[in-house]
Image (cartoon, rainbow, N blue to C red):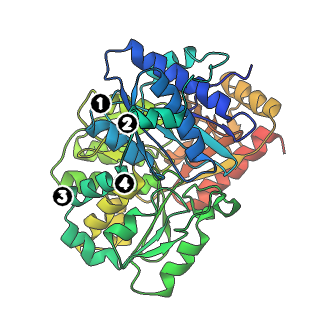
Amino acid sequence: MYKIKFGTDGWRDIIAEHFTTENVRRVAYASAEWLNSSNLPKKIVLGHDCRFAGSMFANEAATIFAAHDIDVVMARNFVSTPMISLAANKLNVGMGIIITASHNPPSYNGFKIKAAYGGPATPSTVEEIENLIPDLAIIPEYSFDHFVSNGRITYADFENMYLDHCKNSFDMEVLTSVGKNLVYDAMYGAGRNVIPALFSDARVLHGGNNPGFEGRAPEPILKNLPEISELIPTSEAYKFGLATDGDADRIGFFDEKGRFVDSHHLILLLIEYLVDFKGYSGKVVKSFSVSDKISKLCEIKGLETITTKIGFKYICEHMVTDDVLIGAEESGGIAIKGHIPERDGIWMGLVLMEYAAKTGKSISQLIDDVYAKVGAFAVERYDLHINNELKLSIIENCQKNSYDSFGEYKIERTEDIDGFKFHLSNGSWVMIRPSGTEPVLRVYAESSDSKRAFEILDATKKAILND
């Protein structure tokens, strides 16, 4: 029997290979059993994104929950992960479920579990549910249509709920004034209706229906966004570029020159705006792979920082129990005070646009302001697609401290919170970690500029692969 394992955010696998209706029923069964054993309301919100067969898988999960006497409130059409999390937060339910594989390639689908507070379920909850997954989930006696007809399964408009929340939370007059300056790449994902609804004159790319995402993984990183980076320099009207992934919880962003602005820089900009312009305070919770410049800016502002393992569920644990200003990952997942404890690509894009509009500065000028405080830097990443035997061998070498240098770069100290971060001279570092959702080995490097970061990556790759 195939063993279902949850990664950094949910269970994901290849459609028709392991992500099947039978296995979705198994996970839904365990989730329902867990909810019924808890003191939480016996009610869930449920949706799916734009991936192939999302509606079918969502209906299968809904039927299992309904058969466990749990009320199910569903979206009729595709929704984003932040929409499900917001609905879970607002509708007094015990759990939120969304069928999505987020940024993974189009052959994947997945099952994410959201808690009643509107963010990822805690690691302990996920582990408890995982342990309840049966070898076989019996097909319920009654059908999906039966539970719809008797009212156990009902429908709600989570997209309009999200849009209203946006309109009530931002200075829409200011945002609307710069809406015409926005290019938005929806990546054929579940956020594609939001930006046109908020800004009728924004330029939208890849906003149609394409469950195969044109064969491109819907991950908002530079290599997947050639159109937006080429379009912005063609007109002085375009001041912002925003992209979101398949379920719209991750952000990709571009400045007015069409240059990609990575998450490390976005986190710094958000801290600046939230503290200096909004007057907010709180801790900064960051994943292990983010730039050290985050800690430096926090020191300047007197903010406490907490570093977690990779995976937003670890960040979310702090956001629901502590006073947190921002929780952020290297991979484009960011949450801030004043919203739900959930990654939200569109929300972060709106905050950044509001920041620029209210200061009258461009994104590149705002970045220069940050550089004046913490210094210029770049973080780059390689995703190494290698066989499992070699990957395990590299990780074992890291565990045994087998590396004392990568080429000319001497290792001064090592951290192993999640993966292995090797600190080098002059504030540079390189990090090695296997992905929690894909069969790849990730290698990150930070240095004073992109050229030096890639030089460190190349030296590290050569050393660990014995090239």
The residue indicated by pointer 2 is: 119
Circle 4 sits on which residue? 159
Residue 138 rendering spot, x and y as whole percentages: 62, 19
Task: Report if the CB atoms under discs 2 and 1 are less than 8 Å apart.
Answer: yes
Q: Amino acid at mark 2?
A: Gly
Of pointers 3 and 1, the one earlier in the residue sequence: 3
Q: Which of the two discs, 3 and 4, labels the residue nearer the N terminus?
A: 4
Crowdedness near tag 3: few (<14), some (14–19) or many (≥20) residues, C-alpha within 10 Å: few
Secondary element under disc 2, as helix, strand or loop, is: loop
| Residue 101 visible, this orientation | no
Q: Which residue lies under the disc numbered 1?
A: 320
In three-dimensional space, the C-alpha distance between marks 4 and 2, rounded to whole angstroms, equals 17 Å
The residues bearing labels 3 and 4 have C-alpha atoms spaced at a distance of: 29 Å
Residue 132 visible, this orientation:
yes
Residue placed most toward the observer, 310 or 404: 310
Q: Mark 4 is on which residue type?
A: Glu
Q: Is residue 37 left or right of residue 369?
A: right
Of the two numbered discs 3 and 4 in the rendering, the one whose residue sits closer to the viewer: 4
Q: Secondary structure at mark 3?
A: helix
**Residue located 33% across and 72% down the image:** 199
User: CA separation, marks 3 and 1?
Assistant: 24 Å
Q: Earlier in the sequence, mark 4 or mark 2?
A: 2
Which residue is rendered at x = 63% and y = 60% of the image?
213
The one of 330 and 140 positioned closer to us in this rendering: 140
Mark 1: amino acid: Val
Q: Quadrant of residue 2?
A: top right
Q: Nearer the viewer, residue 367 or 219?
A: 219
Mark 3 or 2: in front is: 2
- Quadrant (top left, top right, bottom left, bottom right) of the N terminus: top right
Counting from the top left corner in percent of width and height, residue 430 is at 60, 42
Q: Position of residue 339 (x, y in %)?
A: 27, 46
Pick the front one: 356 or 32:
32
